[in-house]
Image (cartoon, rainbow, N blue to C red):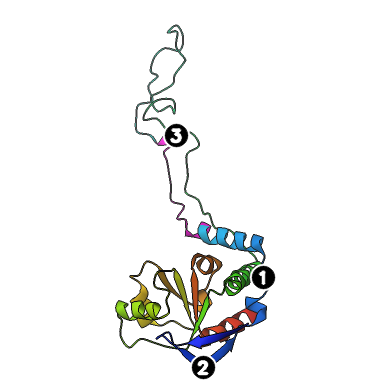
C-alpha cells in the first residue's frame, strides 16, 4: 500500500512511502485482537482490592445468645457475615490478573490492528520531525494542520523524543509512543494513526524478527 508523505504543516512533500503488505495487509484475526486487548487491560489492573473476612473483623467473639429456646436462628458472634459490620463472604482478595500470550499471537494481533487502520485509510505518514522546545501549542498546531485535532490520535515515533512526548502529554485525545512500545489496544483506540517515514522502517524491522 502506497501512502503520500506530508510534513507537520499538513502539506504534501511529494514523497511516497510503501507500507509493507506483511504488516498492513494481512488477513485480520479478530480473536487474536480480542486476546491481546484482554491481556493489555488485565495488566493495567492493580489487583489490590481487599475485603475483610470474619477472622479479620474487630469485634467480640462472645456468643450473642443461647443456642436454643429463643425461637430465632442460632448465632455465633457479631462478626458473622449475616450481621451488619460482619465479615464478607467470598470477598475480593489481592491477586495478579496478568496472563501470558505467545509472541506470534501478539504479533498477529498488532498486524491485524494495523491492517484495519490501513483498510479504513486512517493512517497518516509524516516526514521525520522534532520540536525545538516543549510546547503544547506546537503539537496542537501540528494536529490542526493535519485536520485531526478533534480526533483521537496515536503518534508512533521511531525512538523516544522527550520534546514531542511532553508537548502532547496534556492533550486528552493525543498519545505518543515509540515503535517498540506500540500495542493493539492503543492502535484500535485511536481514530487516526500517525507514523513517520522512519517509524515504518522500524516497524518492518521489528515484525521481521
Q: Position of residue 82 (x, y in %)?
A: 44, 25
Residue displayed at 35% across by 26% down? 60
Chain-order first, disc 1 or disc 3 = 3
At 46% from the left edge and 73% from the top edge, which residue is drawn?
A: 154
Q: Residue at x 43, y 69 (%)?
A: 151
* Residue that lies at the very extreme toward the top in this rendered image: 69
Label 3: few (<14), some (14–19) or many (≥20) C-alpha neighbours in 10 Å: some
User: 5 and 195: which one is in front?
Assistant: 5
Residue on which disc 3 sits: 88
Mark closer to the observer (1, 3): 1
Segment tinted magenta in the rendering: 42-56
Residue at left 34%, top 33%?
Answer: 58
Residue pointed to by mark 2: 14
Mark 1, other Cα within 10 Å: few <14 / some 14–19 / many ≥20 = few
Query: Image height check: is 143 above or below 42?
Result: below
Instruction: Between label 1 and label 2, give the one nearer the viewer.
Output: 2
- Tell whether label 2 touches label 1 (CB within 8 Å): no
In space, the residues marked 1 and 3 are separated at their CA atoms by 42 Å
How far across and how far down the image is residue 116, in percent?
A: 60, 70
The quadrant of the rendering that contains the N terminus is: bottom right
Horizontal and vertical percent position of residue 203:
57, 81
Q: CA distance from mark 3 to mark 2?
A: 67 Å
**Is 40 within the magenta?**
no
The image's mark for residue 157 is none
Quadrant where the C terminus sits is bottom right
**Secondary structure under badge 2?**
strand
Residue bearing the label numbered 1: 104
The earlier-in-sequence mark between 1 and 2 is: 2
Magenta part, dominant SS: loop
Residue 209, visible in the rendered structure: no
Q: Nearer the viewer, residue 46 or 178?
A: 178
Amino acid at each position: 500500500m502506497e501512502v503520500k508523505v506530508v510534513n507537520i504543516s499538513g502539506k504534501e512533500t511529494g514523497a511516497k512511502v510503501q507500507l509493507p503488505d506483511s504488516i498492513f495487509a494481512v488477513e485480520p484475526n479478530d480473536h487474536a485482537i480480542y486476546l491481546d486487548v484482554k491481556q493489555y487491560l488485565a495488566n493495567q489492573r492493580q489487583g489490590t482490592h481487599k475485603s475483610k473476612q470474619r477472622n479479620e473483623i474487630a469485634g467480640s467473639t462472645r456468643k450473642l445468645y443461647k443456642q436454643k429456646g429463643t425461637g430465632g436462628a442460632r448465632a455465633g458472634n457479631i462478626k458473622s457475615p449475616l450481621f451488619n459490620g460482619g465479615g464478607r463472604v467470598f470477598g475480593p482478595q489481592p491477586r495478579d490478573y496478568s496472563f501470558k500470550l505467545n509472541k506470534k499471537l501478539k504479533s498477529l494481533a498488532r498486524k491485524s490492528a494495523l491492517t484495519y487502520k490501513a483498510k479504513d485509510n486512517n493512517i497518516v505518514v509524516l516526514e521525520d520531525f522534532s520540536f525545538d522546545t516543549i510546547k503544547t501549542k506546537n503539537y496542537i498546531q501540528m494536529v490542526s494542520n493535519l485536520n485531526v485535532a478533534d480526533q483521537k490520535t496515536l503518534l508512533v515515533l521511531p525512538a523516544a523524543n522527550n520534546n514531542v512526548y511532553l508537548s502532547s502529554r496534556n492533550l486528552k485525545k493525543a498519545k505518543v509512543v515509540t515503535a517498540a512500545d506500540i500495542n493493539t489496544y492503543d492502535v484500535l483506540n485511536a481514530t487516526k494513526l500517525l507514523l513517520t517515514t522512519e517509524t515504518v522502517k522500524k516497524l518492518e524491522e521489528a515484525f521481521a524478527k
